[in-house]
Amino acid sequence: MSEAKTKKWPENLIQNAILEMKLQRGIVLPLIAMNFTWFAKTAITTVFLGRLGELSLAGATLGFTFANVTGFSVLNGLSGAMEPICGQAFGAKNHKLLHMTLVMAISLLLVVSIPISFLWLNVDKILIKFGQQEDISMVAKKYLVYLLPDLVITSFLCPLKVYLSTQNVTIPIMLSSALGVALHIPINVLLSMTKGLEGVSMSYWITDLLIMTLLAIYVVISENRKGGKWNEGGWWEQEILDWIRLLKLCGPCCLTTCLEWWCYEILVLLTGHLPNAKQAVGVIAIVLNFDYLVYSVMLSLAACASIRVSNEIGADCPHHAYKAAYVSLGLSIVSGFLGGSVMAAARGIWGPLFSHDKGIIRGVKRTMLLMALIEVVNFPLAVCGGIVRGTARPWLGVYANISGFYLLALPLGVILAFKVQLGLAGLLIGFMVGVVVCLALLLMLIARIDWVGEANKAHMLANNQEEAGEAND
């Protein structure tokens, strides 16, 4: 690559930053809608569980939390390894690599689903061993037994979403998700009336099956239509080196996702050990319900950053990848302040929507103010994770997460909450310090990225893949 090419930079930085923002807007808005509908689906399921009684709500909620920790976080994390490979392959116009990565990811997730299903089938024994009540544990098992098909469906759905989004095809994902959520309510009404708890559990994977089927049909039609890339092959041409590369990325991508998801679950568990546990758990549950809405935007910005960076690196355009990364960071900072402001403004009305207890309402007001400060930092942190994922170096996110959250945030939060006796506020202050440290580490790592070197590596990989494919032909 010539020196002149690497130094090409638009004369009008503002104008080209606006152009990059327009490109990102076309990706991020449908992703926000998709993620928002995913959280809406979970909220709808919770409403129908609540109508079945206290025991059903408690057992199913516990079961779904177990499913998130042991199943869905793992499958989502593993499919995240597709983002840098498919994003760079699309940028390099290497459709064979796109095809083979989709098949490999689906195959891998199906294999991983087998041990996960054994965990779900023994969830009652695991929960009882960790001190949960037997009746709640049995309900959790019943809920997860009827949720088992969702492991297979998610093994197809997650890779299909990544496959399409890394090619900037996001509208079909948004529309299929919206249709799925719209039908989720009547499906729940019908099945909850006829089958009770089992019906609510079944409705969850039936909705996912509908979304997955629509996306699969779209992929087949779009690949076969005039100008499609189906016939370029690569679907079944995987070699050992391809599997090794995917697995190397799967580990850190999965760890990063799981570490983030688990940290929130640990936060809730620690809240349950506070002196005023019932009130504290009620407060954090209500606050996290708002946080999930904000998280849908955050997750979409991170995915958009990963897609844009990986596309430009794969296209051998390091200056564009650099621009995409820093425009994404700028947008995340603005979004962080907006998200934090919205959360702070809503703190007076959010609590009464869930509870009439004055103590809980006051706690929600205080906690949402602290959480608003955390969100200001969380947005750029999530986008930093997307940037390093787009450069096929997700292990940078693993190091930052372990250092910021697990070596600092959780120990400091425990000290402030239990030793200093600050309660829930202490846990969140510790969490905030960890988020700031995690962001600082990732910013330092991103500032040291050699964009030309990353583009060269991605370009060489794409060329090698194409040459290998031609040799096989």
Image (spheres, grey):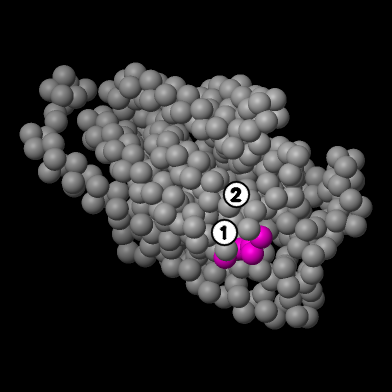
Our reading of the magenta stretch's main secondary structure is: loop
- Residue at left 79%, top 69%? 53
Nearest to the observer: residue 68 or residue 245: 68
Task: Give the residue drawn at x 72%, y 68%.
Answer: 50
**Residue for point 57% across, 59% down:** 351
Residue range in magenta is 353-357
**344 to 240, vertically: above or below:** below
User: Do the residues bearing badges 2 and 1 touch, measured as CB atoms within 8 Å?
Assistant: yes
Residue tagged 2: 363
Q: Which residue is mark 1?
A: 351
Q: Amino acid at mark 2?
A: Gly
Q: Is residue 413 inside the magenta stretch?
A: no
Left or right: residue 55 versus residue 356 is right
Identify the mark nearer the N-term, 2 or 1: 1
Regarding mark 2 in the picture, which secondary structure is present there? helix
Q: Residues within 10 Å of mark 2 (few under 14, many from 20)?
A: many
Instruction: Using the image, tell me which numbered label, if any, was put on residue 198.
Output: none
Residue 52: x and y, percent?
77, 72
**Total marks placed:** 2
